[in-house]
Amino acid sequence: MRLHQFEVALVISVQAGLAAALAWLIGHDVLGNPSPVFAPSAAVGTIVAALGQRAHRTVELLIGVGLGIATTDFLLMFLGTGFWQTGFVVGCAILATLVLFGRSGAAVGQAGGTAVLLATLSPAQQDLEWPRIVDAMVGGVVGLLVVALLLPINPMRILDRDAAPVFRCLAGQLREVSAALATRDQQRAVRALETLRGMGPDLDRMHQALSGAEEVVSLAPARWWRRQDVERFAHGTVYLERVIEHSRGVARQSAMALEYNESIPPDLSVGVGYLADAVELLRREHRTGRPPERTRQKIRDAAHQAGRARALGVDDFGDAVVAQLRAIASNLLRATGCEPTPANQEVRTAVQDGKESVRTGGRSNE
């Protein structure tokens, strides 16, 4: 985790330093501003914005500057300058920004900073409005150019890095449930359920990474060829969240089946373990760009084991585990790119094959 944080900090630091230097160079040498302080500031503000929000952040910077200028010029025209006028116009500029755009940190900060600048320096230096607007535009555009053209990040690396904890946790807890069923350890299933319920922060980071990756493949020509990979990942993420929800159901129903001492065929534990294998394979094949055939085969194996468990005999909660397992299998197939109808049909066929293997004395896929 520390290595990951250092890597992220290093990339952002290099991008921010380069953007600040270029913004100052353009403002000073190209546009002739002797003190282009706010151009580097705006550039850095764009860079340090969260991934996926940098273009939005640039727009907010410009809006904040515009509102700050409009509010301050209007009020100072009637109030004059002084300590209380400065406080009043700054408060009004921030209030106007909050009312119009909500709690947008970049816009509010720029509106307040611009109001302070104009209210305090206007008596000594005239015509500050236009340089302030130009600085904000230069800084924001330079920041976007740095992340889009000069130092674009690898979108798939971002996605794999921030999605890895989700895949690891999901696969790990499915293995815990599988082990709980095999050893009839009800508390182990309960602990797995609690861990699955606590995946919110990991999912939030994955969504932020996805937003950043989508921004990169939209802005950076060097990364346009990755668009299809990012779109495929985004498609899979929708179904992965459903898999997590159904996995919580597997853990919950497994804990109930064990609490009431229901019959648990070994095939049920094996099927849940196969789902854990499928989750790990899905991440691996997404990362390498290989066709997800191994993932799909493992999903079919899991559904086959579920069919065998139902044919061997399960009680109420055990039957609910089988139903949740089938739902996970269907959604995992959709995450690999299968359409809903073929995915459901594949699961039904695998379950039916599992049932038939019990009736005919066939062997498990274990």
Image (cartoon, grey):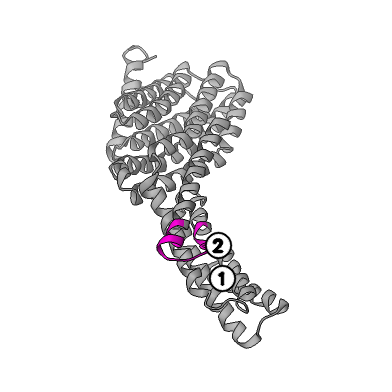
Pick the quarter of the image with the C terminus: top left
Residue 275: image location, x then y, percent: 43, 26
Bin the neighbour count of mark 1 within 10 Å (Cα to Cα): few under 14, some 14-19, many 20 and up.
Answer: many
The image shows a total of numbered marks equal to 2
Q: Which numbered dot is residue 97?
A: 1
- Residue named by callout 2: 104
**Res 1 visible:** no
Residue 85: image location, x then y, percent: 68, 79
Q: Is residue 36 magenta?
A: yes
Residue pictured at 32% horizontal, 20% vertical: 356
Q: Is residue 248 above or below residue 150?
A: above
Q: Quadrant of residue 111?
A: bottom right
Identify the mark nearer the N-term, 1 or 2. 1
Residue closest to the eye, 160 or 203:
160
The reply to whether callout 1 and callout 2 are in contact (CB within 8 Å) is yes
Is disc 1 placed on a helix, strand or loop? helix
**Res 231 visible:** yes
The magenta span reads: 25-40
Pick the quarter of the image with the N terminus: top right
Q: Is residue 51 above or below residue 325?
A: below
